[in-house]
Amino acid sequence: MTAHTPRLQVDFSWKKFKGLITDSNNPDADPLYIVHWHAVKAPHLVFKRPADDYTVGTGTLHTVRINADYEVAGRKGTLAAQKRFKTLYTHQSYALSDTDEPVTLTWTSDSGFTTWDFVCVDERQRPVAKYTAKIWGIKKIGYIEFMDDLELTEAARDELVVTGMTLFYCMWLRVNNIFSLFGAVFHRSDKSQSAVKKDEGAD
């Protein structure tokens, strides 16, 4: 990724108890999205456009089931786990498709001591976007980067922001919730939504 890669900054406002997503190249501008968290009731994440309070999308987590559900632009979808004990999720993307049929995007992750990266690739394994969560972040909690050669429409940006952040909190819940372990043990992946090559092996 180059210095010109489109990048969004994800901050947490303790005063408002909301997430603020802004354009890193224009930090003084109003946020592009405001994220509302609901710990108990679903949907657990609500992404709104502050200019008109329009709900861009939502994310719903599950205590036991390791899939996560989302909705963007009125269209419901699922972040479907393709492996039981590693981060390998897929979702059906309409915003990044050149036809009326969706394409399968795949999310993987890699973590270090300070960051947790979630990388999205297309059906040809070309990088599309990356959400980096700062594990020890208090206010600046992460950022979202998009590939230089990606034609970043507003619809594509909305979808990648909603799915990327929903997946992060899905995995955070899995790591910190013992019930998700049982969910992983009994999970059956949706092969119709899989873009995983057969030679990657079993779970």
Image (cartoon, grey):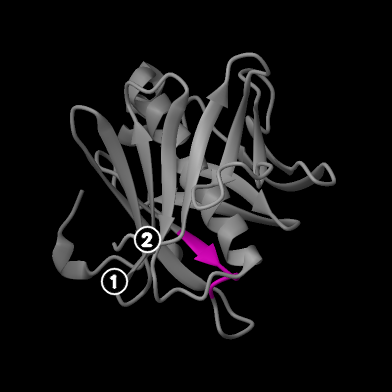
- Is residue 39 in the magenta section? no
The answer to whether mark 1 and mark 2 are in CB contact below 8 A is yes
User: Where does residue 178 sit, x and y in percent of width and height?
Assistant: 35, 17
- Magenta stretch in the rendered image: 91-96
Nearest to the observer: residue 127 or residue 201: 127
- View extreme (bottom): residue: 99
Amino acid type of disc 2? Thr
Residue 40 appears in view = yes
Quadrant of the rendering where the N terminus is positioned: bottom left
* Residue occupied by mark 1: 125
User: Where does residue 173 sit, x and y in percent of width and height?
Assistant: 42, 25
| 20 vs 13: above or below | below
Label located before the other in sequence (1 or 2): 2
How far apart are labels 1 and 2 at the CA level?
Answer: 8 Å
Residue 186 appears in view = no
Amino acid type of disc 1? Gln
Find residue 106 and name its label.
2
Nearest to the observer: residue 16 or residue 24: 24
Q: Is 50 left, or right, of 164 in this rendering?
A: right
Nearest to the observer: residue 97 or residue 117: 117
